[in-house]
Amino acid sequence: MHLLTPSQQERMRHLVQHSPAFEDMQIVVHQDHVEVTHPEQWEFGFESLARKLAGSPDEEWPDLIEDHFIVLIAFAEPDPAELSNLADLQGPTEDVLPRTYVRLAAADSGVAEKAGYAEVVAPGLLWAFAFDGPEYISVMTDKHVRQHGFEQLWNAGLENLSRELPEDFMEVEGVYFGHGSVYVGSLPVILPWVIETVTGAAVEPHGALVSMPARNQFFFYAIRSSNAAGVDSAVHEMALLSGANYEDSGEERQLSPLVYWWSEATGFQAVAHHDETGAHRYFPDELQKVLSDLGVPQT
């Protein structure tokens, strides 16, 4: 919302109030969200909408708003399989925890509007609780989190995620490639454990390069004193593969085309991507200092 001026925010709310996306619905427009009260009960926040509107021509706002909420409404309307999931989510917590996962999602996927507790963990990515039903994976809402308890869901979600570690990672010049279930792309949430389990050595303070182009794919390169000279080539290879795999995965499976650097001190920062003109790297100052301290020439 901070991307829009107060007058722009007011105009946005006015356009939301009169948007054709809510035809035949009863809505209440609040300061930071719109509440649908009939025929269903939904709440949609304005944060991602404000990002879309910022910098867009005024005349495009009505169409952008309509398209935005049409997508969110379609996302919010469960199919019969998800309705079964939602019913299961109302059950005892001890039945919900074994099917709970901490899962990554694209920041513009609509998850944030459905799950207010969701947090951004990397540029373009956030995490949320997922409920793995027999036919459908559902994002848990704030109501579900209140019902079953954040701490219990978090601990169960991480433990269940750890069980999705692929049995085999392919390794080429220090870059590890893993693929498997639809939770493999969420493994960066428990990155230090993954690296130590797969490589047999703990993460060093220099951190690691990671990419997760699709829900079922995860690549990493643990930066160590012994292999720091290979960072540039690793970034190039990971950017190339991540960009290609992201495009080939289809919208339902896509996570991010970016390569990230993670360290305990900085968290995840985007450092590279690949497009039709080649690989582009943009190392933050912290990573450049790490590499300089390790004796890697900077170009």
Image (cartoon, rainbow, N blue to C red):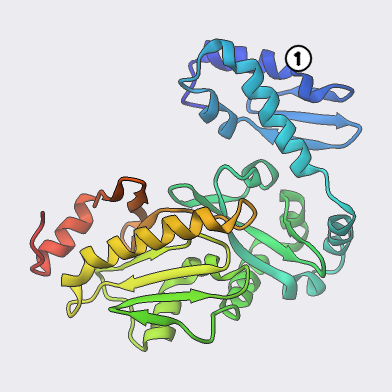
Residue farthest toward the bottom in the current orientation of the protein: 200
Q: In the displayed structure, would residue 204 be above or below residue 112?
A: below
Coordinates of residue 131 in the picture (x, y in percent)? 73, 64
Task: Give the quadrant of residue 97.
Answer: bottom right
- What's the residue at 83%, 49% (across, down)? 78
Task: Give the quadrant of residue 159.
Answer: bottom right
- What's the residue at 79%, 69% (across, down)? 93
**Residue 188 placement, left or right of 25:** left
Count neighbours of disc 1 (C-alpha within 10 A) and say few if under 14, some if 14 to 19, many if 20 or more. Answer: few
Label 1, secondary structure: give it: loop
Q: Amino acid at mark 1?
A: His
Q: In the displayed structure, would residue 286 be above or below residue 7?
A: below
Where is mark 1, residue-wise?
A: 18
Coordinates of residue 44 in the picture (x, y in percent)? 70, 34
Coordinates of residue 91 in the picture (x, y in percent)? 87, 65
Residue 37 seen in the figure: yes
Q: In the displayed structure, would residue 87 be above or below residue 45?
A: below
Task: Give the quadrant of residue 80.
Answer: bottom right
Coordinates of residue 122 in the picture (x, y in percent)? 44, 52
Q: In the displayed structure, would residue 249 be above or below residue 110?
A: below
- What's the residue at 77%, 30% (across, down)? 35
**Residue 162 placement, left or right of 137:** left
